[in-house]
Image (spheres, grey):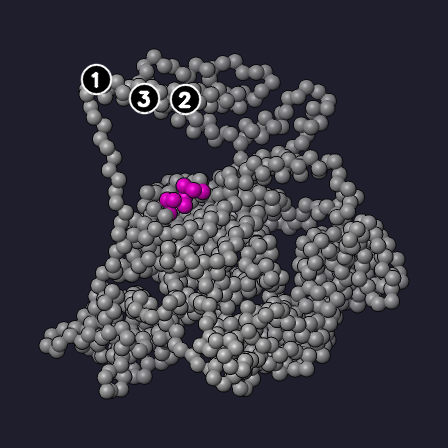
Amino acid sequence: MAAAGWYHGDISQVVAEELLAQAGRDGSFLVRDSESVKGAYALCLLFQRHVYTYRILPDEDGLLSVQTIQGIQAKCFRTLPDLIGAYQHPNNGLVTPLLHAVHRPRPDGDSDGEDARGWGHTVPCPGAPPSSRTHIPQQLHQRLQEQLHSSPASDCMGLMAEYLTQHVQDLGALCHGPPQLRHLSTALATACRALHSEIDFTLAGLETLARVFDPPVSPRSPAREQVSPHSDPDLELLLNKISTVNHLLASMEKKVLKSLQETVTRHNLALPSVAVAPLPAARPLAVQSFEVKVGKSQRAALTVDVESGTVTITKRGSGSPEEVIPQDKILQLIKSQSVQSKARLVCARENQKSLSRDLLFPSARKREAFCQLLQLMKIQHSNLDEPEIISVYVGTWNMGSTPPPRSLASWLTSRGLGRTQDETTACIPHDIYVLGTQENSLGDREWVEFLRASLKTLMAIDYRVVALQCLWSIKMVVLVKPEHQRRISHVHTSSVKTGIANTLGNKGAVGVSFLFNGTSFGFVNCHLASGSEKTHRRNQNYSDILHSLALGDKRLGGFDLTLRFTHLFWLGDLNYRLDMDVQVGPCRCQTGDSGGRGARGVIVPSLAQDILTHIVKKEFQALLAVDQLNLEREKNKVFLHFSEGDISFPPTYRYERGTRDTYVWHKSKPTGMRINVPSWCDRILWKSHPETHVVCNSYGCTDDIVTSDHSPVFATFEVGVTSQFVPKEAPGSSPEALACIEWESIEAILKTTSRSKCYIEFHSYCLEEVQRSGENTFQNCDIPGFLKLGWSSKNLPVLNPILPDLEYLGDQHLLLSIKGVESCESYGECCLALRSAIGTTAQQFETSLFHRGEETGSVRGWMRVRVPRGRSGTRERLYEWISFEEEDAEPAAEPPVCPKPPPQRLRSRPRSLPEPAPGYTNPAYFIFEGVP
């Protein structure tokens, strides 16, 4: 058999259990790929509402056998179908015979168009001979991939893939008659239909230019030749036109060169030499000034000189001398939460207590610019050999298969709409630039050099390339300052195709990961399925990318991708739309329209007009409440525990090219006319390990780059990093004292119908090797669909980090994975920070468990990190001297304007969505806790 309905391929453990629960009959079974052993399988069997998982392992000869209960002789089989057939009989060591096969689900109604053609396809069963009917199309698909790996995506590629999959009828025609290949001719004519107008336009221009230099030329005659009776006339005509264009281009250079040479000789002209412009020198940062109020009402000029390392306060009209504050005397900068334009500067004074000054800026943006300048001053004048804080720029842009404009200044300097950089800090160069693009028609090298040249012009720095990763027209470039190049190591790249049948790269993702000294970074740039109705498909794209991207430390390959890095940034054209059913006529709607008519005089329905009104008035929260990405995050479907900056810029799609004043609501696709409601398709999100430092300083889009129907989006981040720790005491200089991580208890609640015993694996860079606990000592599965497990201190290992210093341990994290004893597969993973557990008393922790992008449960317990005496020294980090004040010590002189939470507060959910309740969020958890 070429395909077996019970074989589901690479589905997750959670999905397998859901399918068996839907089946509901004892003896229901399916087979999936093993998550713990490559080349092995997992047999999932339902009995008495619980799922039992057995591993199917191959031996050295490739024979397959099932790991069953002890005392049952293992049987070996050459193929998986043979094995399944044998275990349909009783007394084979399984809890029940295999009675009812659970088949792969069929696609739902959310699967039309180019992005869904791979849904519902049969999965070939391992060990079964492939049918000749599918063998040839699979070979041709593979060749198509090899030839077009770096080609830009287009509808033409989709038509070719569709032809290879569905239109192999030409093969039958070859066997029964003359080789006319009518299906191929039809596919080619459809794919090239748009070329006719383009060729005619180009041909007319070339003819005109040719007549200037060679008037007798008349190249249009070949297009009127008689076409073959067996060929498609449109295709034959197109080929003649292309031949004419080829002839013109081949002869054009010779004609123009000859004409110019004759002109130079005739008029005795000398060709001017081309002067090479000198490389720009590094620019020192200019002195910046701010108008502020000191105290309650005193107006003053606040001057920041980063190069000299001083802050000067000059009070207006008081006659008092200037107050110059060196950077080493600035002890702390405290931001007010109730008044976002207010800050308190705490300075040291000779022979006196510290002096604090309240500064009120004209706006929150000016306050943030002042804070960034002081942070930069501290960094430049610190005595540290390695940085503790860096600036990361992240940008995403769907270029619409159109070349970029000459200048990308607004994009690269975070200027435009939304939360943008102040002009005083816009041109401060970032340490790392990560630029992701979609539908980028430029060549790889051409695009990289264009970006480097743009940054050199803007910042006077020759940025170095860390990585370039491309999947067709999806590209990501990572650039770094030259002085940081030696700090970058362990660079990995990967890509995932999620396009047609998950084989074409017109949709998918590229990823780059690396270490910056001791901090791991991951970046993912994706282009997900398009179409307002394809929310489920986009969610599946996200899941496939999470599971398939091979990034980061290979030893952490079993962990959820979102847990492998200290900081993970996800960017791209996510294509989530506003969840609104809008019907409009063929029109363009201007954001400045006050009436109900579009640009072509067509009446715009009230719902569409309401959307435009909200955009014009910058009432984005009403629209973000129906943003599909926000809604799916609220349902815990995608981007669990990711953060996103507040969106205060208009929807970035779909604009009329050449302007940012008009949205185009209609788009013609091969599947028909599609309505595009203005949406925030282009997004930047991030997820970081607990108790790390990351602050989003800007999040917005440009308003002057109009070559595409998408606006470029940018975000900038202040990120804390660690370096290789060097202990003050050399190893062996004194009796080695060990730090230890101790556990009092751990309790987990898993979303599973399994009854399996489990153990915990502990991974960390601060451990010499992976550590493992014993089996759980407590188990409760009384609540259907959930399994509660517990470990006492006796079954949990004491972990000894490789270094005992407090300063080192404060930056470390533990990754925990809860695995089944029988299957050795993970039921969920989590990350714990050691910093808050350092001390002599145990501290409680509680966090969610994740696996393959889904929340699979929760874990909590008590732990402590003991640090030996003499190793408890620590110091303040450069990013720790800026803090938030919970409440102002004294009331402000004037009432705060629109008080709201601080912009630096990291949120796992959009501001338009309700905050989750503390503790366990699933109702079944409360049943375990005894809450009615």
| Distance (Cα) linking label 2 and label 3 | 11 Å
Comes first in the chain, label 3 or label 1 = 3
Residue type pointed to by label 1:
Arg
Residue type pointed to by label 2:
Ala
Comes first in the chain, label 2 or label 3 = 2
Comes first in the chain, label 1 or label 2 = 2
User: Above or below — where is 926 with respect to 507?
Assistant: below
Residue placed at 55% from the left, 44% from the top? 505
Main SS, magenta region, reads helix
Question: For the view shown, which residue lies furthest in the front direction?
Answer: 733
Residue 374: give x, y in percent of width and height. 29, 69
State which quadrant residue 866 falls in. bottom right
| Distance (Cα) linking label 1 and label 2 | 26 Å
Q: Which residue position holds label 2?
A: 250
Residue placed at 59% from the left, 75% from the top? 920
Boundaries of the magenta span: 444-451
Q: Is residue 172 left or right of residue 84?
A: left
Q: Is residue 767 left or right of residue 886?
A: right
Residue placed at 77% from the left, 42% from the top? 129
Residue placed at 35% from the left, 53% from the top? 412
Query: Callout 3: helix, strand or loop?
Result: helix
Q: Which residue position holds label 1?
A: 266
